[in-house]
Amino acid sequence: MKLQIPKLKMSVILLLTGLSTLSKAQTVHRTFTFKKGDQFQRTAFLSSNTVLQRGDQKFNINSFSSTTKVYDVVDATGQGFNLTVTTTHIADTVDAMGKKLAYSSDTPANDSSAIAKVLNNIAGKVASVTINKNGLVTDVTDPALQFTNDTLTAFTGLQQEQIVKGTTLGLLADFVLTKSLKSGYAWADSTMMNGQKTKNTFWVDKISDKTTTVVFESAITGGYTNSNTNGVYVIDNQTGVVLERMMKSIISGYQLHNRVVYAASKRTAFTESCYKIH
């Protein structure tokens, strides 16, 4: 079954690439201490509803996706770590305009649609990543990047991790737990780019012997698209790995395509869990 969906690229502003902005609240960066052979698995679930409207023409797109990735530390040096990031599983369901697409990387593809082809090209791909001892990406080769940037991927609900040089790897949080840090500690930061203002607010919800829970709110205003996101991160105190993420986001505004303006809105709910395999 082929889904004929207008090729409008809908931006989803979710803070899924890690808690790099947490470091702005501190004067020191975390030093990670992984060993060769360490392996972590992350599984993410995302549901979304997108509405596009122009006059009497209205498109509703609902989707649910799950993605599993495995992070392998293949080498550890004094300067940092080399990892492979393998997308081991993708499942996705898209319901649009009375038609439905269901995809799973566990079964042979029986759908010739463009969306199914994109997902099939992402599944099984292996990215090679180098990070320094503070978790910042210094080099990356990601063969799936050309597919994750495809316009149609935005309608699958699939939220792929964008591994970018100079940012913290999404597996990690550059957050240093100190004895003076207490529950209720809060901070904020804001940036301006291309006429859009982003304001992030963080606060420590609770601290235990094993984990730290950080709550955040993020708002992007200005331009043609505005968004509001709120969520929770649970960080492993010993390793600095983000064990859980839970986020909800609302995006609204206008999208321009072929000189035609569409009113657009999108709601998403995202949950993710991570654990160490060995």
Image (tube, rainbow, N blue to C red):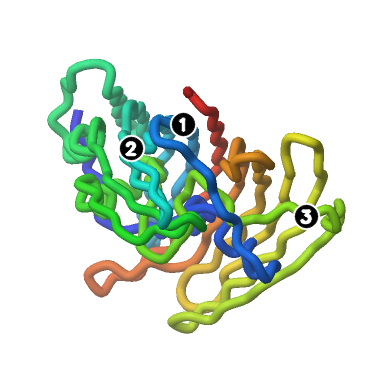
- The residue lying toward the viewer, choosing from 184 and 31, is 31
Looking at the rendered structure, which numbered label has been put on residue 74?
2
Q: Which residue is tagged 1?
A: 40
Q: Decide: few, some or many residues near mark 1? Use Cα within 10 Å; few <14, some 14-19, many ≥20.
A: some
Q: Amino acid at mark 1?
A: Phe
The residue lying at 32 percent from left, 58 percent from top is 9
Residue 178 lies in quadrant: bottom right
Q: Amino acid at mark 2?
A: Val
Q: Earlier in the sequence, mark 1 or mark 3?
A: 1
Please tell me whether mark 1 sits on a helix, a strand or a loop: strand
Instruction: Examine the rendered structure and indicate whether residue 7 appears above or below residue 269.
Output: below
Residue 130 position in % (x across, y down): 34, 52
On screen, residue 31 versus residue 149, left or right, reads right
For the view shown, which residue lies furthest in the left direction? Answer: 112
Residue 254 position in % (x across, y down): 43, 68
Q: Is residue 67 visible?
A: yes
Please tell me whether mark 2 sits on a helix, a strand or a loop: strand
Q: Quadrant of the N terminus?
A: top left
Q: Decide: few, some or many residues near mark 2? Use Cα within 10 Å; few <14, some 14-19, many ≥20.
A: some
Q: Earlier in the sequence, mark 3 or mark 2?
A: 2
Q: Amino acid at mark 3?
A: Thr
Q: Which residue is tagged 3?
A: 178
On screen, residue 75 versus residue 112, left or right, reads right
